[in-house]
Image (cartoon, grey):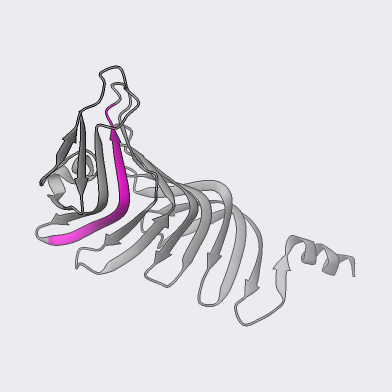
């Protein structure tokens, strides 16, 4: 059957952190039965949920989403965020390390892989912001990456490129192919095209 719940706050410890993250339910729920043959329908629907994870009473992760769908596919279960999510990571002292926002997300817990798409934005503690259209988080490896176009805005410059590898808090990252950059306080953009024109002169 499908479980349907509203305005829930979930709290989990580190031992069940990622499993519980997307594959548990608690609190009062209204069950809506579905046909056994309708395997594509979610087994749980959560509306306006906040999910908290802690270790030794210290907050590690907070996830907020307006809609969360859980699918119990036998071979590859997954959880979908069709209306987007906001995921905040905290350090061991409870200080915010990074925040991720996206208009769509999907999690494959068996693969320990999360994919977010559409207006993806990640901001770290150094006030650096990544913008791209798709990002993959490999949880066990503690890294995020994309092969898509990326824009990174720092306090000093804006960098454009294709592809990126980073740790999960976006505090250490590398752009695979830098297209160009522009100083935040300058109107002169340094791109590959500009460099070629300068070389010709």
Residue 183's x, y, as percent? 63, 76
Q: Quadrant of residue 106?
A: top left
Quarter placement of the N terminus? top left
Q: Locate residue 69, reporting x and y percent.
A: 30, 39
Q: Tell me: residue 44, above or below residue 75.
A: below
Judge whether residue 109 can be spotted in this image: no
Q: Residue furthest top?
A: 37
Quarter of image, res 9: bottom left
Task: Decide if residue 134 is on the left or right side of residue 185.
Answer: left
Q: Which residues are magenta?
A: 58-72
Q: Give the residue at x 14% y 42%.
A: 29
Q: Quadrant of the C terminus?
A: bottom right
Horizontal side of residue 116 vs 192, given as left or right = left
Q: Is residue 68 magenta?
A: yes
Q: Is residue 151 above or below residue 3?
A: below
Question: Does 62 appear in magenta?
Answer: yes
**Residue at image x 40%, y 63%?**
171
């Amino acid at each position: 059957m499908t479980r349907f719940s509203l305005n829930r706050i979930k709290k989990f410890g580190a031992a069940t952190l990622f499993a519980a993250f997307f594959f548990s339910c608690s609190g009062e729920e209204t069950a809506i039965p579905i046909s056994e043959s309708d395997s594509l329908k979610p087994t749980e629907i959560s509306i306006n949920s906040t999910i908290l994870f802690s270790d030794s009473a210290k907050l590690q992760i907070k996830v907020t989403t307006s809609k969360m769908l859980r699918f119990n596919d036998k071979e590859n279960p997954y959880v979908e965020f069709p209306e987007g999510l906001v995921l905040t990571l905290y350090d061991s002292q409870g200080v915010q390390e990074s925040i991720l926002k996206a208009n769509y997300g999907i999690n494959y817990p068996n693969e320990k892989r999360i994919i977010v798409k559409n207006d993806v934005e990640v901001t770290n503690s150094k006030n650096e912001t990544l913008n791209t259209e798709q990002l993959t988080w490999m949880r066990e490896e503690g890294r995020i990456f994309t092969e898509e176009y990326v824009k990174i805005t720092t306090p000093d410059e804006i960098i454009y490129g294709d592809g990126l590898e980073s740790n999960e808090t976006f505090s250490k990252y590398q752009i695979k192919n830098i297209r160009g950059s522009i100083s935040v306080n300058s109107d002169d953009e340094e791109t590959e095209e500009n460099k070629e024109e300068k070389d010709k002169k």
